[in-house]
Image (cartoon, grey):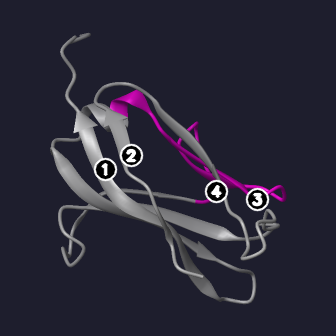
Amino acid sequence: MPAATTNLTIEQGASFDTTVVILDQDGRAVDLTDYEAVFTLRELPESETSLLELATPSDSGEGIDVNADGTVRIRALAETTAALDFFLVYYDLLLTAPDGTKRRALQGLCQLSKAISRVE
């Protein structure tokens, strides 16, 4: 099943928290128990360096949580998004099943909404 394509916006200096539901070809939620996930931002798909990489398990309020109900929650702390500096980049969400099968579940463009307020 091909990856779903959707565009995201991250607000610089604010917490990023988004949840997606992974469905099978019949429209049913996939049980993601024991899956691993990686969310990566790159300037170009072929870029060697990632601008942001979040993975399972989430730690200290940042990372990815995968659940039996098919939900994938992706979170980045405000301190992390404050350090980002781009306008528009590419991202994807890669899931790895317990048997090692890899599936790119989500992909698209990610825009950074630049912060105006500066909190020191």
Q: Amino acid at mark 3?
A: Gly
Q: Give the spatial CA distance, label 4 vs label 3.
A: 15 Å
Q: Residue at x 78, y 73 (%)?
A: 26
Secondary structure under badge 3?
loop
| Residue that badge 4 annotates | 57
Q: Secondary structure at mark 2?
A: strand
Q: CA distance from mark 2 to mark 3?
A: 19 Å
Q: Which residues are magenta?
A: 56-79
- Give the class, few, some or many, for how many residues have Cα within 10 Å of label 1's Cα (few <14, many ≥20): many
Question: In the picture provided, is 28 more to the left or to the right than 45?
Answer: right
Magenta region includes residue 94? no
**Quarter-of-image position of residue 79:** top left
The reply to whether dot 1 and dot 2 touch (C-beta < 8 Å) is yes
Residue 82: x and y in percent read 27, 31
Label 4: state its secondary structure. loop
Amino acid on which disc 2 is placed:
Leu
Percent x, y of residue 74 = 55, 47
* For residue 77, side relative to residue 20 (left or right): left
> Residue tagged by mark 2?
8
Q: Which residue is mark 1?
A: 110
Quarter holding residue 72: bottom right
Q: Earlier in the sequence, mark 4 or mark 1?
A: 4
Name the one closer to the observer, 108 or 80.
Answer: 108
From the viewer's perspective, is the residue at label 2 or at label 4 nearer? Answer: 2
Q: Earlier in the sequence, mark 2 or mark 4?
A: 2
Between disc 4 and disc 1, the foreground one is 1
Q: Nearer the viewer, residue 6 or 17?
A: 6
Mark 3, residue position:
70
Choose the circle earlier in sequence order: 4 or 3.
Answer: 4
Amino acid on which the number 4 mark rests in the picture:
Pro
Q: Residue shown at 30%/56% (left/top)?
A: 109
